[in-house]
Amino acid sequence: MDKGKLYIVATPIGNLSDFTFRAKEILENVDLVACEDTRHSGILLSHYKIDTPKLSFHSHSGQAKVDKIMAYLDEGKDVALISDAGTPGISDPGYVLIQAALEAGVDIIPIPGPSAVITALCASGLPTDKYLYLGFLPVKKGRQTIFKKIAASEHTVVFYESPHRLRKTLGQLGEHVAADARVVVAKELTKIYENYYRGTLPEVLTAIPEKPKGEYVVMIHN
């Protein structure tokens, strides 16, 4: 029996209209959709009237869940992997399943679409021919090392940050980078409150609310 295929399907990062025709077709026709959060993904699937069975697969799922999905693939069933938003495998646990599938000889088929990194960079106005993506910065250990790495980079650096750490991170970053470093902070991409804060670090910190809300992508070029 041939193994099933594992589709890596990108989903909207905010605006549900950013869903591609191909992504919808794939999710309608696979045997199982592995979701980072079935409740969150259920909103998207319900919106597009997709009733394919769902299975949760997140950072705390463990090996048992990987084995369960692999069993589907071994039976010749096709599985689509989606994250809460954007492209699976980027700052989410998808790579664990992808690695297991590759080792088992399963065909991996990416279905491209939204990505917060690319969406933010293309509108940033910063150089994008080369960039360094750091995902989410460490909460405690290793932060100073990361800040030094950012300060030493010759390319645009991009990372994600939570709202309750955003101002603290920017303040700490200001202790390492040049005073005239160009900074862009993108807020709530593709959503109704989408916004961009541009300028030097002090200018951006002044513009950002004292208690930020939403999701943020931070970009800096020395």
Image (cartoon, grey):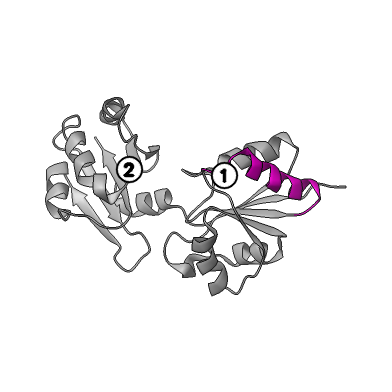
Q: Residue furthest right?
A: 1
SS at mark 2? loop
The image quarter in which residue 195 lies: bottom left
The circle on residue 176 is none
- Tell me which corner region of the image, top left, top right, bottom left or bottom right, holds residue 21: bottom right
Q: Quadrant of residue 157?
A: top left
For badge 1, the amino acid type reads Ser
Helix, strand, or loop for circle 1? loop
- Graded by Cα atoms within 10 Å as few (under 14), some (14 to 19) or many (20 or more), the crowding at tag 2 reads some
- Residue type for callout 2: Pro
Q: Give the residue drawn at x 40%, y 54%.
A: 119
Q: Which residues are the magenta region?
A: 60-77
Left or right: 104 with respect to 121? right
Give me the residue at 34% from left, 41% from top: 158
- The residue beneath circle 2 is 127
Above-or-below relation of 98 to 143? below
Residue displayed at 51% across by 63% down: 39
Which residue has dot 1 on it?
61
76 relative position to 187: left or right: right
Can you say whether 143 is above or below 32 in the image?
A: above
Near-viewer residue (37 or 107)? 37
